[in-house]
Image: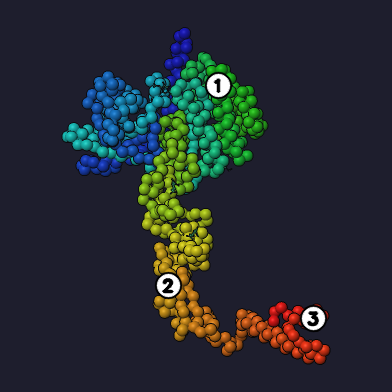
Amino acid sequence: MASTAARRLLLPLLLVALIAAHRAAARFVVEKNSLRVTSPAVLRGVYECAIGNFGMPQYGGTMHGVVVYPKADAKACRPFADSGLSFKPRSGGLPVFLLVDRGDCYFTTKGWNAQNAGAAAVLVADDRVEPLITMDSPESSGTEHIENITIPSALVTKRFGEDLRKALQSGDMVNVLLDWRESLPHPDERVEYELWTNSNDECGAKCDMQMSFVRSFRGIAQALEKRGYTQFTPHYITWYCPEAFVLSKQCRSQCINHGRYCAPDPEQDFSTGYDGRDVVLQNLVQICVFRVANGTRRPWMWWDYVHDFAVRCPMKEKKYTRECANGVINSLGLDIEKINKCVGDPEADKENPVLKAEQDAQIGHGSRGDVTILPTLVVNNRQYRGKLEKTSVLKAVCSGFEETTEPDVCLREDIETNECLENNGGCWLDKATNVSACKDTFRGRVCECPIVNGVKFIGDGYNHCEASGLGRCQINNGGCWNETRNGKSVSACSNQEAKGCKCPAGFKGDGANSCEDVDECKEKLFCQCKDCACENTWGSYECSCGGGNSLYIREHDTCISKHSSSTPSWGFLWVVFLGLALAGAGAYAVYKYRLRSYMDSEIRAIMAQYMPLESQDMPSQQHHLVPVDRADV
Ligand SMILES: *[C@@H]1O[C@H](CO)[C@@H](O)[C@H](O)[C@H]1NC(C)=O
Ligand SMILES: *[C@@H]1O[C@H](CO)[C@@H](O)[C@H](O)[C@H]1NC(C)=O
Ligand SMILES: *[C@@H]1O[C@H](CO)[C@@H](O)[C@H](O)[C@H]1NC(C)=O
Ligand SMILES: *[C@@H]1O[C@H](CO)[C@@H](O)[C@H](O)[C@H]1NC(C)=O
C-alpha cells in the first residue's frame, strides 16, 4: 500500500520534471481572435482576446451580441439558476455575451454555467495584469461537461474587463462582435493541418473526445485528402527523461531508446496496467503507419488504422499490444515489414529518426507556438482552439482555404450560411436566366462574374456582367434582344462579335433591350421608283414595279424592263416557251379547220354529183369520211 502511494506521489513529480525539461526554451503562442466593440463610442475599437480551448469557436464566422455582467455570482462558479438569473435573449434580442471574472473554479465550469443560463458566449476577464493565456479544460476531475459546452469562450485582459464593467455600470449598452474570420491564415487552395494526438485511450473525457473525433471526422478527412484539398499529418508528443533518471525504474517503464522518448503512464500508476513505454511504442507504430501509407500515396490510411486500432485493441480489454496492432496492419493491407523497419529497435541506445523528427516538430516555428496541449489541431501552421469536434474542426479547416477555392463540403447548410440567398448577396443577377455573380464562400460571399457552360462573363460583378467570347449568344442570347414572329427569328447578338449587341439589318435600336422594325417605305429608304408599290414587312419590305413590263431588282433597288433584260430570267423563258406552244396549238387548230372545211366541200361536191342534198344528215358511210369533229362543229 505504502509503496503504491509513494509511486503515485513520485509520478507527478517526475512528469513535472519531464515537462519542465522540455519547456525550458518553450515559446507559447496564444491563439487570438478579435473582439470588436461597436458601442459605446468611448470603447469602440478592436480588442484582442484568447480563444478558449473548449466550446465551439465559429472559425470563419462572426457573432454579434450585447455584454451582460451578472448581478450575482460574477465568477460563474455556481449554476445561475441558483440565483434566479437567466441570460436568454428575448425574441428579437441580441445574444448575450456573459462577462465573468476569472478565479475560484475551472474555466470550463464558468462556460458550462453561462451556457446553461442561456448566454451565447462567455468572456472571462483576467484577474491579473499579464499577457493573455489560453484557457484550457482541466485534465481530470470536473470534466464531465466539457463535451457538452458548445458556446465559444474568450479570455480578455484585466484592463478591458474593467472598462466593460464600468461602461455597463454607467448604463451603457455594450455591443460587441466576436470575429473568427481572420483567426486562421488562408493563403491558397490547399489546407495543411496536423493533429497532435496520442494512442492512449484511457485518459477520461479527453481521450474519449479524441476517439469520437477520429470516428466522426475520418470520412471527411479522407475525402478531402483524396481529392487533394488538404495535406494532413499526424503528430505525437514525446518527452525525454532527464539524464539523472535514465536508469531509474520509472524512466525505464515510461521510455524507450534509453530514456530518449517517454510518455506518461496511462493510469498514472506504475504498478498496474500499461506503461508509458507501451504508449510511446504504439504512437511510434502510428507514425510509421502514416509514413509507409504516405509512401504509397495513401496517407489517409492512417485514419483507418487509428480508428480500427482503438476499436480492436483497447486498453480496457487488455489488447493494447503489438500483436493486436499487427492484426490491424494486416487487415488493412499495409506493408508490415516496412512498418517494423520504421519502428526500429526500442531497446537500442540511440536516436530513432522518426521520433526525433516529432520532437523537433513540437517546437513552434513561424506563427505557431510550441505544442504542449494534447490533443492539438494545427491548421495552416496556427493552433486551433476549441473543442475537438467534427463541425468546429471542419469550420476551422474550411476557413483555411482561399476564398472560392473551398470544397463543397464547406458550403453545406449545417456548416455555413449562404449569403447569396438573401438579396443575391448584393451582387449582379440576371433575372431572366438566373445567372448570378454571387459566389458563396466559407468566409462570406464574393461578387464575381461567373462562367456558365463555358461562356465567360465579364464585368464588375456588382452592377454589370456580360457574356463574352464564343458561344456567348447561347446564354440568354448574350443579353441582347431577340424575337420571333411568324416563324421568323431575329437576334441582335452575333457570335462573330466579341461583345455587345447590334440590331440586324432592317431593325434599329440599342440592341440590348429592343430593336424596332424599320419602315423602309415610310422612311423612303428603298422602292422609291415611279409607279412602284412599297409594302413594309417585319424586318424587311416588298416592292413591286408599276406596269406589267418591269421587274424589281432588289440588290440594285431598281425596276428593269423585261425585254431589255440582258439576262432573261427563267420565268421570262417560260413565258416565251408558253407563247410558242400556244401559237403552235393555234396553227394546228387552224390547219385542222381548214382541212375539214376543204374536205367537207370536196365531199359535198362529189356527192352532189349522185344525189340531191336534202338535209345536213349524213348517210352512215359518210361517217368514215368525216369521223371525228362532227358533233363539235
Ligand atoms: C452531455 O450530452 C450528452 C449527449 O448529448 C448527454 O447524454 C449527457 O447527459 C450530457 N451531459 C450533461 C452533463 O448534460
Ligand atoms: C507524404 O508524401 C508527400 C508526397 O507524396 C510528401 O510531400 C510529404 O512530405 C510526405 N509527408 C511525410 C510526413 O512524410
Ligand atoms: C435561381 O437559382 C436559385 C439558386 O440556384 C434558386 O434557388 C432559385 O429558385 C432560382 N430561381 C429561378 C427563377 O429559377
Ligand atoms: C432568344 O434567344 C434564345 C437563345 O439564343 C432562345 O433560347 C430563345 O428562344 C429566343 N427567344 C425568341 C423569342 O426567339
Q: In this view, does 129 lie to the left or right of 417?
A: left
Amino acid type of the residue that numbered disc 1 sits on in the rendered structure: Pro
In the picture, the disc for residue 513 is: none
Q: How many residues crowd around disc 1 within 10 Å: few (fewer than 14), some, or many (20 or more)?
A: some
Question: Do the CB atoms of the residues marked 3 and 2 lie less than 8 Å apart?
Answer: no
Q: In this view, does 46 lie to the left or right of 440?
A: left
> Relative to residue 406, is residue 285 depicted above or below?
above
Distance, label 3 to label 1, CA atoms, is 136 Å
In the picture, the disc for residue 314 is: 1
User: What residue is at 24 percent from the left and 27 percent from the top?
Assistant: 70
Quadrant in which residue 350 is drawn: top right
Q: How many marks?
A: 3
Q: Is residue 159 left or right of residue 400?
A: left
Quadrant in which residue 593 is drawn: bottom right
Percent from the top left, x then y, of residue 238?
50, 29
> Relative to residue 512, is residue 383 depicted above or below?
above
Q: Is mark 3 on a helix, strand or loop?
A: loop
Percent from the top left, x then y, of residue 359?
50, 34
Tag 1 or tag 3, which sits nearer the N-term?
1
Q: Is residue 284 left or right of residue 134?
A: right
Amino acid type of the residue that numbered disc 2 sits on in the rendered structure: Val
Residue at disc 3, CB closer than 8 Å to ligand 4: no
Percent from the top left, x then y, of residue 588?
72, 85
Residue bearing mark 3 = 619
